[in-house]
Image: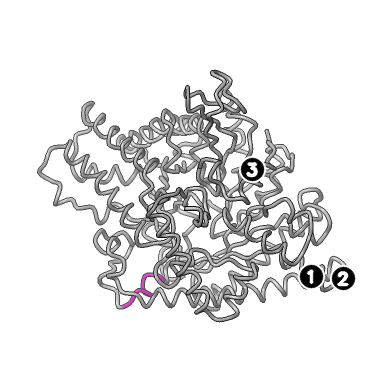
């Protein structure tokens, strides 16, 4: 199995996984060879990264399925409440497996608490003490399956995210409490969970779901999950929080040139990321004597030229997908998971045009260092330069939206694989300390070893969030699990809301002794002395075993220093 090219931490060695990877690598090469030279050359050289190449022209990226519309109500009615509850989770499992086989990216349950409330209510299930226990048991089995099963492509889990926290109904509150409690008291690190924080619903003590918010923070303090969508941040106040959800990888699909702004039933269709530091390297080599003002002017020109190539490449991929038939998406077709009836469309463009075409980026921190000689968080001037660069990128994206009338978005890419791939390729052309450390910093984040306190980190990163309408996140690094410091999490969430942060997460080392089950942060188990330790860390939004991190992410973890 040594020939498997592991590109993300969820992969494991299996025969089927090996066969898949070999075939996938063949398809990727075949696709790159078939593309316009300007697309394939930019990818080969590491100026851009075309994600999920094996799915080029064959499928879209991710989906927030509508769980309610296509539920087989008539098939399950007339049986016992216990049987119906089992059918609900069988249905969810079929959707996850089906989508995992017909799309390239993640699956987001947009309002899991509301959806379960609607389904349970419509099926007239009596949630008494007995049936609640049955529901919780089936929910637990579903979450355990997602945590343990590596069924997708024979080697990975399904990338599943629960969004919840806003349902104030008795059933919705029960579902949210059950998800959080089961996750907190288990060893699961999947599925991912995002808690939506909203004033009037759960943010303040007088809000009905405040107790669930408190439970969520306790779960975060123990397991790093959930992360938090901050509905009350200034730029998110324009968004209907009941109609938006996020993927664990931070993707944000909402704006729509062709109709209602919503995430439910919509997809990110295609995305490609740009290597920002490479542009700065080229400028420094070609024009070493330029002053900073001229460098920045040239950077904008070079970025826009590269973005135009990416834009054309996204269109190439988009139109190839649009030529497919509805039969190519049987799970969507059977369960009506998208917001349109796929069987009644004249062509698939009638659906895909509602989704997003994302241009991503990583390495802003390294870029500013290369252009100015200093990290962007060490001076207000450099921070302004960094903000202006990201604003320029967003302005360009908005120009594409206006000119072509498609849902282009700017994505602060998580970059699990490309955080190492880009510097590795750049090292063929350049030598610099930002390359030698082995990784580039995700999206607009400050350096992982910045040493900033958490409030300053939020202050520096917060202003970037409003520009990244395709998705972004800010992470805060704790020295260890803040089990007895939930107040710190509360305070930082409030500060992040006021700093216009879109999406917030908390990281810390989580070590689990496989001999005695002790959890903490240690080199050797401080309870039994064992070296048989599983080290859980967050990578690209999801929790994973550090042993399986890509080389770039392993290098990043080695450089991380706590903010608190």
Q: Which residue is mark 3?
A: 557
Residue depicted at x 67% and y 76%: 305
Say whether marks 1 and 2 touch (CB < 8 Å): yes
Magenta-tinted stretch: 347-352
Residue 548 painted magenta: no
Task: Say whether disc 2 or disc 3 marks the residue closer to the N-terminus.
Answer: 2
Residue furthest bottom as drawn:
36
Q: Which residue is mark 2?
A: 290
Asked which secondary structure carries label 1, the reply is helix
Residue 341 x/y as whole percent: 28, 67
Asked which secondary structure carries label 2, the reply is loop
The quadrant the C terminus occupies is top right
Residue 373 x/y as whole percent: 84, 56
234 or 49: nearer the viewer? 49
Residue 331 x/y as whole percent: 28, 60
Residue depicted at x 57% and y 75%: 40
Label 1 Cα neighbours within 10 Å, binned few <14 / some 14-19 / many ≥20: many
> CA gap, disc 1 to disc 2?
9 Å
Residue 30 x/y as whole percent: 48, 74
Q: In the displayed structure, does residue 6 sit left or right of residue 173?
A: right
Q: Please tell me whether residue 260 is drawn above or below residue 162 in the rendered image.
A: below
Q: Please tell me whether residue 281 is drawn above or below residue 374 in the rendered image.
A: below
Q: Please tell me whether residue 363 is drawn above or below residue 351 in the rendered image.
A: above
Q: Quadrant of residue 431?
A: bottom right
Q: Which mark is residue 283?
A: 1
> CA gap, disc 1 to disc 3?
30 Å
Give the prevailing secondary structure in the magenta stretch: helix
């Amino acid at each position: 199995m040594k020939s498997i090219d592991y590109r993300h931490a969820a992969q494991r060695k299996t025969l089927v996984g090996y066969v898949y990877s070999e075939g996938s690598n063949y398809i990727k090469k075949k696709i790159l060879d078939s593309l316009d030279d300007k697309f394939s050359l930019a990818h080969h050289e590491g100026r851009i990264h075309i994600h999920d190449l094996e799915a080029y022209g064959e499928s879209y990226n991710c989906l927030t399925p509508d769980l309610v519309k296509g539920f087989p109500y008539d098939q399950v009615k007339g049986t016992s409440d216990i049987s119906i509850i089992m059918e609900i989770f069988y249905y969810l499992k079929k959707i996850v497996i089906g989508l995992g086989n017909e799309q390239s990216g993640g699956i987001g349950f947009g309002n899991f608490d509301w959806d379960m409330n609607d389904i349970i209510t419509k099926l007239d299930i009596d949630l008494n003490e007995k049936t609640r226990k049955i529901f919780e048991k089936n929910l637990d089995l579903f979450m355990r399956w997602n945590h343990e099963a590596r069924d997708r492509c024979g080697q990975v889990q399904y990338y599943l995210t629960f969004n919840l926290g806003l349902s104030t109904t008795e059933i919705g509150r029960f579902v949210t409490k059950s998800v959080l409690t089961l996750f907190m008291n288990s060893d699961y690190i999947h599925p991912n969970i995002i808690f939506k924080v909203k004033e009037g619903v759960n943010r303040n003590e007088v809000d009905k779901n405040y107790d669930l918010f408190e439970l969520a923070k306790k779960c975060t303090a123990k397991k790093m999950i959930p992360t938090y969508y901050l509905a009350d941040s200034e730029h998110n106040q324009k968004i209907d929080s009941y109609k938006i959800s996020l993927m664990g990888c931070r993707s944000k699909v909402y704006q729509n040139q062709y109709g209602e702004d919503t995430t439910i039933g919509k997809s990110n269709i295609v995305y490609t990321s740009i290597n920002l530091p490479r542009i700065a390297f080229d400028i420094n080599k070609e024009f070493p004597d330029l002053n900073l003002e001229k460098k920045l002017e040239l950077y904008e020109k070079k970025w826009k030229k590269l973005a135009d190539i990416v834009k054309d490449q996204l269109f190439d991929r988009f139109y190839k997908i649009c030529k497919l038939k509805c039969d190519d998406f049987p799970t969507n077709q059977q369960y009506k998971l998208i917001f349109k009836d796929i069987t009644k469309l004249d062509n698939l463009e009638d659906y895909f045009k509602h989704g997003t075409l994302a241009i991503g980026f990583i390495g802003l921190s390294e870029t500013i260092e290369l252009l100015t000689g200093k990290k962007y968080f060490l001076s207000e001037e450099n921070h302004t330069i960094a903000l202006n660069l990201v604003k320029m990128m967003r302005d360009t994206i908005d120009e594409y939206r206006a000119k072509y009338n498609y849902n282009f978005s700017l994505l602060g890419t998580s970059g699990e694989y490309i955080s190492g791939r880009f510097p590795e390729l750049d090292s063929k052309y350049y030598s610099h300390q930002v390359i030698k450390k082995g990784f580039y910093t995700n999206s607009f984040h400050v350096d992982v070893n910045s040493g900033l306190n958490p409030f300053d980190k939020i202050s520096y990163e917060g202003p970037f969030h409003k520009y990244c309408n395709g998705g972004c996140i800010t992470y805060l690094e704790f020295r260890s699990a803040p089990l007895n410091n939930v107040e710190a999490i509360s305070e930082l969430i409030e500060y992040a809301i006021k700093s216009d942060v879109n999406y917030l997460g908390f990281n810390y080392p989580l070590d689990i002794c496989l001999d005695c089950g002790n959890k903490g942060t240690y080199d050797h188990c401080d309870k039994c002395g064992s070296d048989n330790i599983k080290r859980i860390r967050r990578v690209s939004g999801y929790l994973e075993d550090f042993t399986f991190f890509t080389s770039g992410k392993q290098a990043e973890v080695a450089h991380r220093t706590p903010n608190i």
